[in-house]
């Protein structure tokens, strides 16, 4: 089925009240789509979508994707899944169920509707990678029985399901492997490094660096990610992915801490904590495929994105 623009289309966003999902809902509404958000508010928040509720083209449904869902839509963005390590490790069985049962239900829904479906996969499918930067043809180095496995293996199985529905049922699929993304509407207490460091710096609390801080991540600002996701959904049916999405500028965690302290004018000091089990040592996306397929590349530098995010958290902490 041709799907060339969002205007007048009805789009389902699972995890629509989450960090990425809420920005995506906002963007799709701006494109003229009708948007249905489905979320069980496990890690998302109604506050993230409160400003959209007055829009007659927006609808929010409380629902857990591990249960079947019957709605009528033209396309599905499957974003539902806790994404921060402390959240996805809180109830690891539910995390795997969300990825696997959630994917089966959303793929079943897409199959009945002949709708195209996007999967928010992750750089975690590469595990603690042995090649650097990571290209999409790398199969990964993942522990199947560790504390991160509920997330990593759940997402890997979801990718398998997407590609089997594509092969077996001819379903149009779009799989993106998203690398560390940050920005406004992250939860202040979700334990992810950007939100944690900013909140600690603004409160004058110690900045908790895990390990020696020499491990690396490559941070993508939310607006760049949403642009890439919305472009990927509009590519023709032959473009299934997986496609890496993120920003290839790589920083050590210590460098990130120094930037956050500088931009917040904080007097916080660093404290070093043990490195969590299976914490990847380095991570950087190879974005060649995304650039070729989407004619896209990230535009927001870490310094600029951090300043926007700091402004958001400052306002949030003043109100709280
Ligand atoms: P988030 O926790 O803010 O959003 C996830 C949303 O899914 C939340 O609103 C949560 O309540 C909802 N949810 C969780 N389980 C659900 C269930 N069973 N049924 C219905 N809703 C459920 O996280 P995020 O950063 O916005 O991540 C969104 C998606 O992108 C996730 O699938 C995540 O794995 C993926 N991703 C994010 C990043 C990142 O850096 N932010 C990186 C890679 C992949
Ligand atoms: N499903 C759903 N909504 C639909 C259609 C299907 O939630 O509109 C669920 C359904 O509960 C099923 C899953 O999707 O468990 C997979 O559906 P599929 O048709 O692929 O498999 P089957 O129903 O044959 O097991
Ligand atoms: N990290 C840290 N201090 C924190 C939170 C995270 O040093 O308070 C480190 C963590 O060990 C990891 C990196 O920052 O090496 C990114 O962690 P995050 O949880 O944001 O994402 P992920 O590990 O899933 O990439």
Image: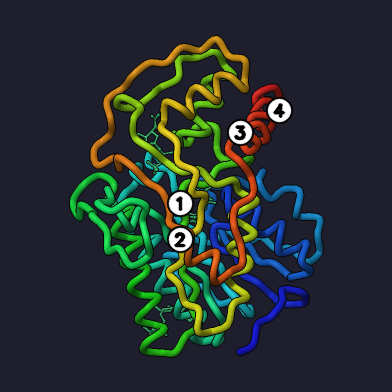
- Which one is earlier in the sequence, the residue at label 2 or at label 3? 2
Labelled disc at residue 315: 4
Q: How many marks?
A: 4
Given this view, does label 3 or label 1 mark the residue nearer the observer?
3
Task: Tell me the residue that label 1 is attached to.
Answer: 179
- Which one is earlier in the sequence, the residue at label 3 or at label 1? 1
- Which one is earlier in the sequence, the residue at label 4 or at label 2? 2
Task: Tell me the residue that label 3 is attached to.
Answer: 303
The quarter of the rendered structure image containing the C terminus is: top right
The image shows residue 164, relative to residue 299, as above or below, that is: below
- Which one is earlier in the sequence, the residue at label 4 or at label 3? 3
Question: Image check: 231 left or right of 143?
Answer: right
Tell me if residue 311 can be seen: yes
Instruction: Tell which of 71 and 144 is nearer to you.
Output: 144
- State how far apart marks 3 and 1 are (Cα): 18 Å
Labelled disc at residue 229: none
The quarter of the rendered structure image containing the N terminus is: bottom right
- State how far apart marks 1 and 2 are (Cα): 7 Å
Q: Residue at x 51, y 12 (%)?
A: 268
Q: Is mark 1 within 8 Å of ligand 1?
A: yes
Q: Quadrant of residue 39?
A: bottom right
Tell whether label 2 touches label 1 (CB within 8 Å): yes
Q: Is mark 2 within 8 Å of ligand 1?
A: no
- State how far apart marks 4 and 2 are (Cα): 32 Å
Characterize the local packing of mark 3: few (<14), some (14-19) or many (20 or more) Cα atoms within 10 angstroms: few
- State how far apart marks 4 and 1 are (Cα): 27 Å
């Amino acid at each position: 089925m041709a799907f060339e623009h969002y205007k007048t289309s009805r789009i389902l966003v699972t995890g629509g009240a989450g960090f990425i999902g809420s920005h995506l809902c906002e963007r799709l509404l701006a494109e003229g789509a009708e948007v249905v958000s489905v979320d069980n508010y496990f890690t998302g928040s109604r506050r993230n979508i409160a400003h959209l509720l007055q829009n007659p083209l927006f609808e929010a449904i409380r629902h857990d994707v591990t249960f079947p869902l019957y709605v009528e839509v033209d396309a599905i963005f499957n974003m539902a899944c806790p994404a921060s390590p402390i959240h996805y490790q809180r109830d690891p069985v539910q995390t795997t169920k969300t990825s696997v049962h959630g994917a089966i239900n959303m793929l079943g829904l897409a199959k009945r509707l002949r709708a195209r479906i996007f999967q928010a996969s992750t750089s975690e499918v590469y595990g603690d990678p042995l090649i650097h930067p990571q290209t999409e043809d790398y199969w990964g180095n993942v522990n199947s029985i560790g504390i991160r496995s509920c997330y990593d293996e759940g997402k890997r199985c979801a990718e398998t399901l997407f590609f089997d529905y594509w092969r077996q049922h001819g379903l149009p699929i779009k799989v993106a492997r998203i690398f560390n993304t940050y920005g406004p509407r992250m939860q202040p207490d979700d334990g992810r490094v950007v939100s944690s460091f900013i909140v600690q710096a603004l409160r004058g609390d110690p900045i908790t660096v895990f390990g020696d801080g020499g491990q690396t991540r490559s941070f993508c600002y939310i607006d760049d990610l949403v642009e890439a996701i919305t472009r990927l959904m509009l590519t023709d049916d032959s473009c299934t992915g997986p496609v890496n999405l993120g920003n290839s500028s790589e920083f050590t965690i210590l460098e990130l801490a120094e930037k956050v302290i500088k931009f917040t004018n904080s007097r916080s000091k660093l404290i070093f904590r043990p490195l969590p089990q299976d914490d990847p040592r380095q991570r950087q996306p190879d974005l060649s495929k995304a650039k070729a397929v989407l004619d896209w590349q990230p535009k927001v530098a870490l310094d600029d994105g951090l300043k926007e995010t700091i402004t958001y958290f400052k306002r949030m902490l003043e109100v709280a």
